[in-house]
Each structure stands twice: as C-alpha cells, then as structure tokens.
Image (cartoon, rainbow, N blue to C red):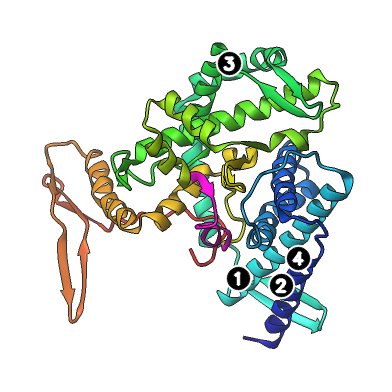
Amino acid sequence: MKAGEDKLKEILEKEIKRIRTSYVGEDVIFGLIEIIRSIDYHSFMLGHNLNEGDAVLLEKYKFGWSLMFKIFYEELVPDDVPLFSSNKESYEWADSAIQHCGSIQLCNQLLDYVKADLMKLQSDNPKSFTFTNLTKYSLEVFEKISLGYYYSIMDRILEEKSKRIIEKLPSIRKGLQQIVKLMYEEFIAYQATDEVDKFYGEFAYLYLMTSQTIDEFSESDTFGDYMYKEYLDVAEYICRQGIMHRDCCMALAEKTSHKVYLRNVLTYGFSIQSFISSLSEYLGWEEDKVKKIVSCFTLNKENYLHHLSYPKASAAPYFALGKDTWVRSTFGCLDRPVFFLNRELKRKYPKDYFNAVNNRELRFKEQLYSLFNQDRIEKIQQNIDIKIGDKTTDIDAVLYDKERNILGLFQLKWQDTFYTSMRE
C-alpha cells in the first residue's frame, strides 16, 4: 500500500478511537439509544425536499451511524432499557459524532475505490489528501439505474392502487390526531382503529412492492423451515409499523403545536414478549415461529459484526438492547428491511441460502422460455456442458427458431443486490 494510503488509514483509526472517548455517560445504553434516535430523526427531517447540502449531510448519517453503533454496542451488557428524553448535550454529542463517523466511513469507501483502481489518491502533505476519479461510469451506476427501472415498472403496475391510497392519505392522517396522545408528557401512545389498521396495511403492501427488492428468491424457497413468503409477510408488517408510527408521531406533533420533540417519539422501545404475542395473533402463527422469523430482522450480539462491517449498513428494524426490551427504528422499518433480511438469511442459514441461489437459474430459464410461445421455437431444457482442455462451463438456455434458422444461446446470470460495499 502506498505511503499516502497508509497515512490516511492511520489517521482514520486514531479518529475512531477518539470517538469512543468522546462519550462521557455512565452507561452506553443511553448513547446507543441516542444513535438510533439520531438516524431516525435526521433521515426523516432531511429526507424531504433535499437540497445539495442536506443530501451530503444525510449521507454522513447513513454512512456514520453503523460505525458509531458498533463502537458502543461492543460494550453493552443487555439489561433494562431506560425511558428518557433527549437533552441538548446528549443529542448534540450523538449528531456530531455520527457525522464525524460518516466522514470516516466515506474516506474508507474512497480508499476501497483506490484499491480497485477506480480512484487515485494524492497527498501533498501529511494532513492533505486528494481523491481523483479515474472512471466515468462503473458497474454500481448501472446497478442503480437497473434498480430504478425495476421500481418504475412496479409503480406503473400498482398505479391505480397507489392513487387510491394517496387520495385517502390526508383524511387518514388528519384522523390520527383523534387516536394519538401524550404519555408522560413527552412520549407517544395510540391504539389504531380498524379503519386505520386496514389503510396502513394496504399502504405497507404498496410500499414494500415499490421500494424493496422482493424477487431475490422464490416465495417457496425455505430458510430454517419457513418459506420466504412468510419472511416477506413480516417485512410487510414491519413497513406497516414504520409508516403508521411515523404518521402518528407527526399527528401528535401537530396536535400539541409541535411541543413534543419528534426525536423522542420516532424511536420506540417495547416489550419483546408482548410484541411476539401480538404479532402471533395478527398472523395466526405459533409464537416460536414468529420469534425465529422476527430474529432475522433484528440486530443483536450474535450478528452485529456481520451487518455493521459494511459501509452504509442497512439499519435493522429492531435492535436488541435489553434483556426483555427491544428498540424499534422507524428508519430501519422503512429504509431497506428486506435487504437486511436477505443478508441475515445468508449468515444464519448458509446452506438454505446456497440452495435458494441455485434455484434462481431454473426460475430465470422458465421466465425466459415463457416469452417464446411460438410453435416454431424449439426449447432445450437441459444445460449444454462445454469442456475446453481442463476448463468447463455450460450454456444455460438454448432457443432455436426452426423457420428462420436462428439459434439463441444464453448464459443466465443473477447478480445479488449490492449498494456500497466493494467486497460485494
């Protein structure tokens, strides 16, 4: 590694150590909750009508929260989760430190680009570093374009249903003021009516279909004895929770003339057992099944290093912070819950994951062949093996037009969704 890269990495490591010493609280549980509150609050506040400055700041929060959370979560011994309101000192510390961690993570990301020969690093002096882009486009650009195209198709397919939701949304949101109330003068409580529950159930389905990639696996693929569709059912429930809670928080803010601080209410602590029992009743499943599936949407001591080792890590919908209490992140519920799920399934059920990935090729071939229903098209069902010397490969799909004498050979590839990790 070049001297400039070594020097920058050394600086970044020192800054990470300095972040830990910046916390002066007695128990890291308070700091961890403030970190979740920061990403929940600022992703909501900065996510509307972004200008260039807000966009950069939001990226720092999205890149920085995971590094900072990992630093303090290592020290957590799960116990009781306190209910407390943020004060100026605590939230300014969390906001500042997360932004600084975001800058560190962005620098590490640029160093990965340098390693991949996508960027060049120059250092004029020990404290000045300049990155220069060496390529106009990269695979990541085309991946994002492809993902955007997928979402645009889903938007068109669900356009009529989306219109009905959008038309009804203002009246539903206004009605939320009748069900929300203050708890202990600073927090939120509410009980959804049947109408509200039904509306947000429909809203969550549309949100899941138009903001998440849900076709990585077949609904019938199994992970730990449960079908992927059942995991997606819970993902839809999580989206419902996130959207409804976000709107209820806004309703309470308006009802109290914005005296309630959104930072204190967007992030929500709850009893694990009560949640499992409620979800079990809602879905009609055994509690043991609910626990196992919900665990795949939860950041805990067993999996946090796996998930937080990536830059701009997906936030979990649920954070295991206490013995009997979890904390729900509104940002985690609405950002990329399915992406978090898929990564956890890969970690927790590697054999099932490998089998599901292998099933993709057959599904892909079936979808391809379904586009050619003409009698003149001959379809070869088995793969064609090819061996050249000691190297072997195969042709995944073969179509032959008997009338036009045209042969189509296909190599089918299905790329896993990735976002910011060069290792992926």
Magenta segment includes 299: yes
Q: Amino acid at mark 4?
A: Arg
Crowd around label 4: few <14 · some 14–19 · many ≥20 (10 Å): few
In this image, 389 relative to 229: left or right?
A: left
Q: Earlier in the sequence, mark 4 or mark 1?
A: 4
Distance between the Cα atoms at labels 4 and 1? 27 Å
Q: Residues within 10 Å of mark 1 (few under 14, many from 20)?
A: some
Cα distance between the residues tagged 1 and 2: 10 Å
| Position of residue 83 measured from the top left corner of the image (x, y, whole percent) | 73, 38
**Comparing labels 4 and 3, the label whose residue is closer to the camera:** 4
Q: What residue would you read off at disc 1?
A: 113
Q: Could you give the CA–CA distance between mark 4 and mark 2, rounded to whole angstroms?
A: 28 Å
Q: Secondary structure at mark 2?
A: strand
Residue 196 — which label? 3
Where is residue 249? Give x, y as percent: 72, 27
Question: Which residue in the structure is indicated by mark 2?
Answer: 131
The tag earlier along the polypeptide, 2 or 3, is 2
Q: Amino acid at mark 3?
A: Val
* 351 inside magenta stretch: no
